[in-house]
Amino acid sequence: MELRSKQRFSELNGLMYACGFTEAELGRPMVGVVNAFSEVVPGHMNLRLLTDMVKAGIHMAGGVPIEFPCIAMCDGVATGRYQMASRNHIADSIEITIESHMLDGMVLLSGCDKIVPGQLMALARLNLPAIMVTSGPMQPGCRNGRNFALSDYVDNRMAELLGKVRFAPREKRELMEQAFPTIGSCQGMYTANSMAIFAEALGLTLPGSATIHAVDTRKMTQAKMSGMRVVEMIQEDLRPSSILTGEAFENAIRVGISTGASTNLCAHVPAIAREAGLEVTIDDFDRLSRETPHLSEMCPAGEHAMLDLDRAGGVAAVMKELASLLHLDVTTVTGRTMAQEIAEAEVRDREVIRPLNDPIRPEGGMVVLRGSLAPEGAIARSASFPPGGLVFEGRARCFSDADLAAWAVLAGEVKDGDIVVARYEGLKGGPGAREVALLPYMLNALGADRIGMITDGRLSGSNRGALVCHVTPEAYEGGPLALVEDGDRILIDIPGRRLDLLVSGEELEKRRRAWKRPEHSDLLSFMRRFVRNVGTLHQGALEE
């Protein structure tokens, strides 16, 4: 390809000289290296090292690496309203830097929840030769001879909070050490690893990227090879538009569904597809889920961690098992087809990756519900529902945010048979659609047989239970969720794909006339712009 950087760096000017550039570097491919390192994101703690490896690979292949930063938030630490807005900001900031300096390609380094999709949005938007390097998962701990991960740790702490168990200070420290033994993205099929698997299945990383762990030497080798490969991609003019096809998106969604991916994919994947000039809707998730068996029971739904999946053969082995359902002639960043990439893959552990003809469940775990409570749809991860709880009718317990609901749980006001309604948690109502993560953990810790939860916000990939999220229209926009009252009967029907408020139309109309939208009074300018411009979660939470 013709190097566009020659237009910007035709000769060594004084400012480039001041940055340490030499005449010998002019005319070589200029590669942006987007480093999302942060000292408060455990999933990114190795990115300085991986960035150095990428840059070494670029140098080895004859390119010139140009590193620049990318903001990063850990959803487990920085839970709040800025998460989804930060994703869009990440994509914008990468566009600004790459286009301002007319770089020829880029390597994107990240690993955690909003950063991976934000970088993928930029990759699709810019359509320059690019490759992603994900930071790698955290190793699971071990407690009582079994995997011990983030979700297990929070379960224990919530049980203590609700008075179910007591831990001495030494035991609390031990729980923490067991649950978080290394750096890396949290160990299960939470959002970070769901997105890493999606990126690999889409063909945007070198094989194995999603499951090679953060402390594994293979991760350094792969980073260096990625740097070398991106220079080759520039020379070959291999761009994302040749990789990001509708068939590739179907492949990646199927792989995510078969491994029990986070519901957050339903907000991120449509946004990435939109940047690539494609349309992916929540109905595509539902359609593919009906056709795709659930092959891997990963935590939080099961006991297997990402380390188990890696040892069982990784994403390539899952795709080999799903081969009859996939489009294997799609291109990947290696320049080879997906069929060629998975040709030598094999499943090494049938407990971790089940056979296609003997799955955990005949359908995948991502379900779209519609009905009188969600006219435009809602999302449920049925793979994480309790056994026998796929049809659940309960009485509403309504709260204007998840924090108030949590206080009610602590006060013993939520009982078996309730469906907790945590509303005004959406993109506009929250605002920002923070992850309503701790409330589901509290409901699990109650030990009740049947307690559900419905929200117009998002859930963490680490959550499990009878949970429904992304209810649209959201309550802030006057959706039916705003009209629910305590004691109303609600039906969650996973097989029937229904979410219904069992209240008459006449009564709802009466309530609608009396409803008033709550106002935000504490927003800074960035979030005011976000609330004004953002669409819906189902449309990818994009700003228009």
Image (cartoon, rainbow, N blue to C red):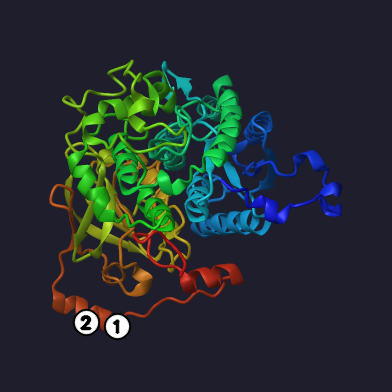
Q: Give the residue number, with chain letter if any, for mark 1.
A: 514
Up the image or down, 91 lies above or below 174; here it is below
Query: Crowding at label 2, few (<14), some or many (≥20) Cα neighbours within 10 Å?
Result: few
Of 471 and 278, which appears nearest the observer?
278
Q: Which residue is mark 2?
A: 510
- Along the horizontal axis of the image, is 154 left or right of 297? right
Residue 102 shows in this picture: yes
Q: Nearer the viewer, residue 177 or 414?
A: 177
In the rendered structure, which amino acid carries the disc numbered 2?
A: Lys
Q: Position of residue 33 (x, y in %)?
A: 64, 42
Element type at marker 2?
helix
Image location of residue 139, percent across then percent down: 50, 25
- Determine the secondary structure under disc 1: helix
Decide which of 342, 47 is in the foreground and name it: 342
> In the image, what residue occupies the spot 19% across and 33% down?
361
Residue found at the very far bottom of the displayed protein: 513
Crowding at dot 1, Cα within 10 Å, few <14 / some 14-19 / many 20+, comes out as few
Dots 1, 2 in contact, CB < 8 A: yes
